[in-house]
Amino acid sequence: MKTIAVIPAHNEAETIQKVVAEVKKYVHEIIVVDDGSTDSTRDTALGAGAAVVSHALNRGVGAALRTGYRAALNRDPDVVIQIDGDFQHDPSYIPRLLEAVEKSDIVIGSRFLNPSHKNYNLTRRSGIKFFSWVANTLGSLSVTDVTSGFRCYRASALRQLTPLTDQHWALEQTLEAARKGMTIKEISVEMPVRGEGRSQFDLETYALYPFKMVDCIIKILIFR
């Protein structure tokens, strides 16, 4: 299968070279979406052998993935792997994702099928559980980590999905896939708390998390 990896990255110069080097072992092509980085993420990714698409400004993960999906699908792959650029997602799990996608449309790497989720603080764990509960309730699913960005798609399934929104992309995408009858599978993937660079989950993010939950529910219910 022709496999392309999409890596959204914002100021990941410290890790992107290592991520690209490891991901290259398992895929045919790599596309890094430089989401308005102010460091050397773009040049470092190019030097590591990835194709790079850049946003002039930081637009967020949802927008970066929209750009990455479009660029990947234009290359006519069979499978698209989505993986972060900060090494929180271990590329050595990619073969397991590829094996699982042979019998599924979407495969999600879950940190809740192993003890690694216990390393996250209570607010973040609660948020993940909440969004997963929403997915299971509204989508008649049984997922444990709907917010996970470590995913594998059949390209044929990805082409059927609506372009991602900037916020809550994972939940909305998963619900749309369920509504369209796609097969969604989870596999256990250990995801330690990131050790390098700057996390997107700062104090402001945690403070706004409850409000984002309510906003998400309202949008999902209106959409449905």
Image: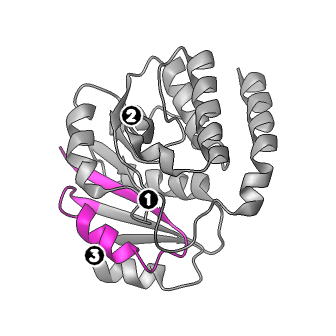
Where residue 84 is drawn, which disc sits there? Answer: 1
Q: Amino acid at mark 3?
A: Gly
Q: Position of residue 34 (x, y in %)?
A: 51, 71
Which residue, given by chain and number where applicable, does mark 2 sit on? 113
> Which residue occupies the foreground of this view, 6 or 75?
6
Which residue, given by chain and number where applicable, does mark 3 sit on? 49
Q: Residues within 10 Å of mark 1 (few under 14, many from 20)?
A: many
Mark 2 and mark 1 lie on one chain; the one further toward the N terminus is: 1
Q: CA distance from mark 3 to mark 1?
A: 17 Å
Q: CA distance from mark 3 to mark 2?
A: 33 Å
Q: Is residue 8 magenta?
A: yes
Q: Position of residue 7 (x, y in %)?
A: 42, 61
Q: Amino acid at mark 2?
A: Leu
Mark whose residue sits in front, 2 or 1: 2
Mark 3 and mark 2 lie on one chain; the one further toward the N terminus is: 3
Instruction: Label 3, secondary structure: give it.
Output: loop
Q: CA distance from mark 2 to mark 1?
A: 19 Å
Magenta span of residues = 1-29
- Residue 42 lies left or right of residue 188; in this view the side is right
